[in-house]
Image (cartoon, coloured by chain):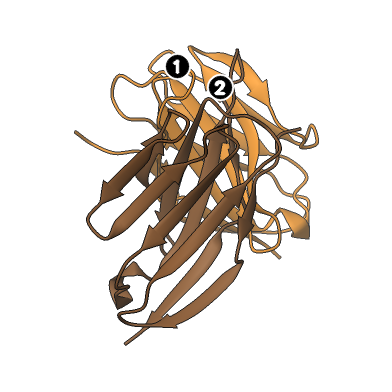
Amino acid sequence: TQLLEQSPQFLSIQEGENLTVYCNSSSVFSSLQWYRQEPGEGPVLLVTVVTGGEVKKLKRLTFQFGDARKDSSLHITAAQPGDTGLYLCAGAGGGSNYKLTFGKGTLLTVNP
Amino acid sequence: KAGVTQTPRYLIKTRGQQVTLSCSPISGHRSVSWYQQTPGQGLQFLFEYFSETQRNKGNFPGRFSGRQFSNSRSEMNVSTLELGDSALYLCASSLGVVGTEAFFGQGTRLTVV
């Protein structure tokens, strides 16, 4: 069974601070996706990382895929209240396994 | 193009009843996956359908079932509802290729009383 552990589970910071969220597994994934979910809504895809060591930037968000494709991190620079939400990582397995395995998420609150 | 549409958005049912949820994927997407989301367990995979065939299944009891139609629309059914089935049910649409991106609907909030 492939499992993804996300840390921290909860994070409350002040506007302007930086933060990093981690997503770790003992399994190798063919790709890893990050989503943000707001209350009462479905998750919205932020980025997909595919290659080990890959780094992708989306404005103030930086995503990194570990060299061994078992872990990933999300770094937010100068957080804003609009960044508040549940951040989920999801790994896609290889072979014929088309399903996504989700971590339990990091609930981020950015206070003004 | 239109996103993933789930209906209804909210449902209240009584224990023992059954419920059917619907999901219309993004046009051209042949894969529909269903997930149950609860505060304690997070997002848990129920099953995935691709071209009308169930291709993957999670670890849920047989009370949870689904199907997919020729137009890729999918339905999920839960029979003999239990209080613990209260959750946000999400469907995700994708091309169905390994590592492909999944796009989620807004979900159906099911409350069992």
- Badge 1 marks a residue whose secondary structure is loop
| Chain whose colour in the figure is brown | A
Residue B106, image x, y percentages: 40, 51
- Badge 2 marks a residue whose secondary structure is loop
In the image shown, does A11 or B36 lie closer to the viewer? Answer: A11
In the image shown, does A86 or A50 lie closer to the viewer? Answer: A50
Q: Which residue matches tag 1? A: B97
Q: Colour of chain B?
A: orange
Q: Residue at 47% x, 31% y: name it.
A: A52
Tell me the chain of label 2.
A
**Do the dots labelled 2 and 1 sit on one chain?**
no
Quadrant of res A50: top left
Q: Residue at 60% x, 13% y: name it.
A: A95
Residue A66 sits above or below residue A17 on the image:
above
How far apart are labels 2 and 1 at the CA level? 7 Å
- Residue type (three-letter) at the residue carrying disc 2: Tyr
- Residue type (three-letter) at the residue carrying disc 1: Val
Residue B24, image x, y percentages: 38, 32
Left or right side of B1 for B58 = right
| Quadrant assignment for the C terminus of chain A | bottom left
Q: Which residue matches tag 2? A: A98
| Quadrant assignment for the N terminus of chain A | top right
Tell me the chain of label 1.
B
Q: From this viewpoint, is residue A43 visible?
A: no
Discs 2, 1 touching: Cβ within 8 Å: yes
Residue B93 sits above or below residue B112 on the image:
above
Quadrant of res A16: bottom left
